Image (spheres, rainbow, N blue to C red):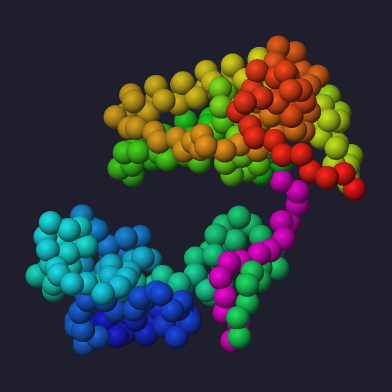
Amino acid sequence: MKVRDITSVIESFAPLSIQEGWDNSGLVIGSQEQEVHGVLLGFDCTPELVDEAARCGADMIVTHHPLIFGGIKRISPEDPVGLAILKAAAAGIAVYAAHTTADKVLAGVSGAMARRLGLEDIQILVEEPGGYGLGAVGNLPQPMDVREFYGGDIQGIIDKLDYLHGLGVEVVYCNPLFVSPSNHKYDTQDYDYIDPHVGKIEVDEGRLLAPGENNNIHSDRYRTRTTRKENLEASNRLFIKLVEELHKRGMRIIIDGVFNHCGSFNKWLDRELIYESADGYEVGAFVSPKSPYRNYFLFHRTPSR
């Protein structure tokens, strides 16, 4: 088998002609006529990945991100990209990338994620002429429960640690885990605690907002979950357990945190009045000029209409 036999299969569903103008999908190193006996798949073509390909006898590497994006003025072993190029060339390993070509077809990255999520009636999110485009959208077969909405929970990570360790994983990276109303959690509500929705809910009471109701002051169940200390402290303890279990296995954790902005739910601002009727909290800056957090924010008076 030759390189062109493999690239022709990939390009039969992810043609190079659809890639973004800034992209560099395709054969980056090697010849289409090169013989191939083994292929190694990866996300980025790092020097370590090239070494692995050489160890396992792979003559070709296929990655998502291109090894070379733009013009290169010099190739040096002191640079990771240069080192990977030199290693691959010296070992006679062909390198191919399917980046935005694979992003813009339902048989590629977005479609695979949509199918993995169990979506139905999957379509391209931003369709271009020819039926290609970035992103995928579909319908859930049934409504998600809260932990599915948030993408799992900390206990789920703990349950999978032995599996991850067995794969050779050394670091677990998490999106923000602080209290937040969103599933991405970059609009932090409380930096002091892990969100009970991904941590542990000990107390769960109060009314839910009715369909179509959008006044968060009535979201009693959400207030209970995210302001009751029983839930917050239990969630912090569970996170501590996660860290301890990781360290037992020689693993580490990176927790993403964004401390230069917050959302309207944040307890220092309390635009949504979540903390107004919760026990044990100072008044929010939006609620009162006397709030201890007032100088955390800059307020502008807008003309009344």
Q: Residue at x 52, y 74 (%)?
A: 104
| Residue 204 can be seen, yes or no | no
Magenta region includes residue 140: yes
The image quadrant of residue 248 is: top left
Magenta region includes residue 250: no
The image quadrant of residue 278 is: top right
| Residue 214 can be seen, yes or no | yes
Q: How many numbered marks does the figure carry? A: 0
- In this rendering, is residue 18 above or below 277? below
Q: Residue at x 54, y 33 (%)?
A: 177
Position of residue 75 in the picture relative to residue 180 (left or right): left
> What percent of the width, then of the height, locates residue 302?
79, 43
Residue lying at the far left of the rendered structure: 90
> What percent of the width, then of the height, locates residue 269?
69, 29
Position of residue 103 in the picture relative to residue 125 (left or right): left
- In this rendering, is residue 217 above or below 88? above
- The residue stretch that appears in magenta: 130-144
Quarter of the image with the N terminus in it: bottom left
Position of residue 210 in the picture relative to residue 134 (left or right): right
Position of residue 82 in the picture relative to residue 151 (left or right): left
- In this rendering, is residue 21 above or below 269? below
Q: Residue at x 66, y 64 (%)?
A: 137
- In this rendering, is residue 101 above or below 287? below
Q: Residue at x 39, y 22 (%)?
A: 244
> What percent of the width, then of the height, locates residue 150?
62, 41
> What percent of the width, then of the height, locates residue 247?
34, 25
The image quadrant of residue 85 is: bottom left
Front residue of this view, candidates 29 and 192: 192
